Amino acid sequence: MSHTPAYGTGDASYQAAGGIDGLRRLVDDFYRLMDERPEAAALRALHPADLSASRDKLACFLSGWLGGPRLFAEKYGSISIPAFHAQWPIDQALAESWLSCMAGAIALQSYAPTFADYLLTQLRVPAERSVQASQNRHRKET
């Protein structure tokens, strides 16, 4: 009888997401939804017109973050998600817009419902931390 490791253990989350190919599908759907949803216009405006690099960076980041190959670090170096995103004035509404687009993208994948719930819950953590880091930085600048 085989036992599947719990999400967050080893590369179980990375495997549940379908590896790098699955993550690239997720990221493609995420950015497509961000482009299509009028309520995500403010979020989309923070991104470059050409999303190719953004797509690659997010997929590579998610790979390592979910316990798979550390592709982001290999290609781009280390990153602190909250510190990086603090350069923009990110508020709770933008974070919720990001999470809403990600929830929509997750729903389009063939993920097990338990993994879909787990992933969205985990993604809320860096989203919230990015809001806090951004508010701290922009509060100091005023």
Image (spheres, rainbow, N blue to C red):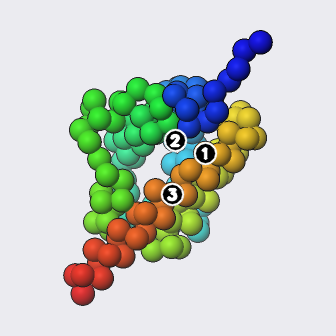
Residue on which disc 3 sits: 125
SS class, disc 3? helix
Residue type at tag 2: Val
Please tell me in which quadrant of the rendered image residue 4 appears: top right
Tell me, yes or no, whether the two marked residues, 1 and 2, touch with CB atoms within 8 Å. Answer: no
Mark closest to the chain's N terminus, 2 or 3: 2
Taking the view exactly as shown, the residue that stands out farthest to the top is 1
Q: Which residue appears at 51% of the width and 41% of the height?
A: 27
In front of the other: 100 or 40? 100
Q: Which residue appears at 41% of the width and 26% of the height?
A: 69
SS class, disc 2? helix
Residue on which disc 1 sits: 119
Q: In the image, residue 127 lies at what x, y percent? A: 48, 60
For discs 1 and 2, the disc positioned in front in the rendered view: 1
Question: Which label number is shown at residue 27?
Answer: 2
Can residue 11 be seen from the camera position used here? Answer: yes
Local crowd size for mark 3, using a 10 Å CA cut-off: few (<14), some (14–19), many (≥20): few
Local crowd size for mark 1, using a 10 Å CA cut-off: few (<14), some (14–19), many (≥20): many
Residue type at tag 3: Val
The relative height of residue 128 versus residue 32 in the rendered view (above or below) is below
Q: In the image, residue 34 lies at what x, y percent? A: 54, 56
Q: Which residue appears at 45% of the width and 74% of the height?
A: 91
In this image, 115 relative to 102: left or right? Answer: right
